[in-house]
Image (tube, helix red, strand yellow):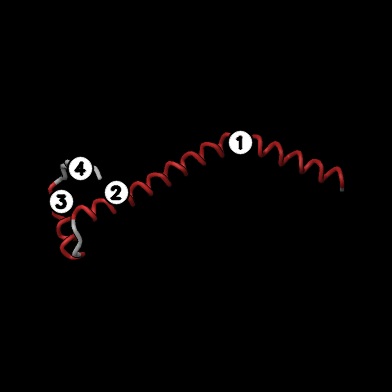
C-alpha cells in the first residue's frame, strides 16, 4: 500500500465524515472504494470517447461498402 497526503475542501471533508459515521466504515476504506469507482467511470468515458473517434474514422468506408452492397442487390433484382 502507498501512503498519501491529501487536502480536501472543508465541505467535502465534513460531508464525508458524516457519511462515514452512518456507514460505520473507516475513512481509508471509503476513499479507496470511491477512487476505484471513479477510476472505472473514467475508464468507461475514455473508452466511449475512443470508440466514437474510431467510429467517425470508419464511417465513410462503412457508407461506401453499404452503397456497394445496395448496388449489388439492385443488379440482382
- The kind of secondary structure element at disc 4 is loop
Q: Percent from the top left, x then y, of residue 73?
A: 81, 46
The front one of 1 and 46 is: 1
Asked if the residues shown at circle 1 and circle 4 are in contact, with their CB atoms under 8 angstroms apart, the answer is no
Residue occupying image coordinates x 24% and y 51% = 31
**Mark 2 or 4, nearer chain start:** 4
Residue identified by numbered label 1:
58
Could you tell whether 71 is left or right of 11 in the image?
right
How many C-alpha atoms fall within 10 Å of the one at disc 3: few (<14), some, or many (≥20)? Answer: few
Q: Percent from the top left, x then y, of residue 2?
A: 24, 42
**Mark 1 or 3, nearer chain start:** 3
Asked if the residues shown at circle 1 and circle 3 are in contact, with their CB atoms under 8 angstroms apart, the answer is no
Residue occupying image coordinates x 35% and y 46% = 39
Disc 1 from disc 4: Cα separation: 45 Å
Could you tell whether 15 is left or right of 49 in the image?
left
Residue identified by numbered label 4:
3
Residue identified by numbered label 2:
35
Residue occupying image coordinates x 18% and y 54% = 27
Disc 4 from disc 3: Cα separation: 18 Å
Is 26 located above or below residue 61 in the figure? below
Residue identified by numbered label 3:
13
Q: Nearer the viewer, mark 1 or mark 3?
A: 3
Amino acid at each position: 500500500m502507498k501512503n498519501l497526503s491529501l487536502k480536501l475542501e472543508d465541505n467535502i471533508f465534513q460531508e464525508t465524515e458524516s457519511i462515514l459515521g452512518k456507514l460505520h466504515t473507516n475513512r481509508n476504506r471509503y476513499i479507496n472504494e470511491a477512487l476505484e469507482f471513479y477510476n472505472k467511470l473514467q475508464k468507461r468515458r475514455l473508452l466511449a470517447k475512443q470508440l466514437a473517434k474510431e467510429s467517425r474514422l470508419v464511417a465513410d468506408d462503412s457508407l461506401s461498402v453499404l452503397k456497394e452492397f445496395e448496388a449489388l442487390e439492385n443488379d440482382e433484382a
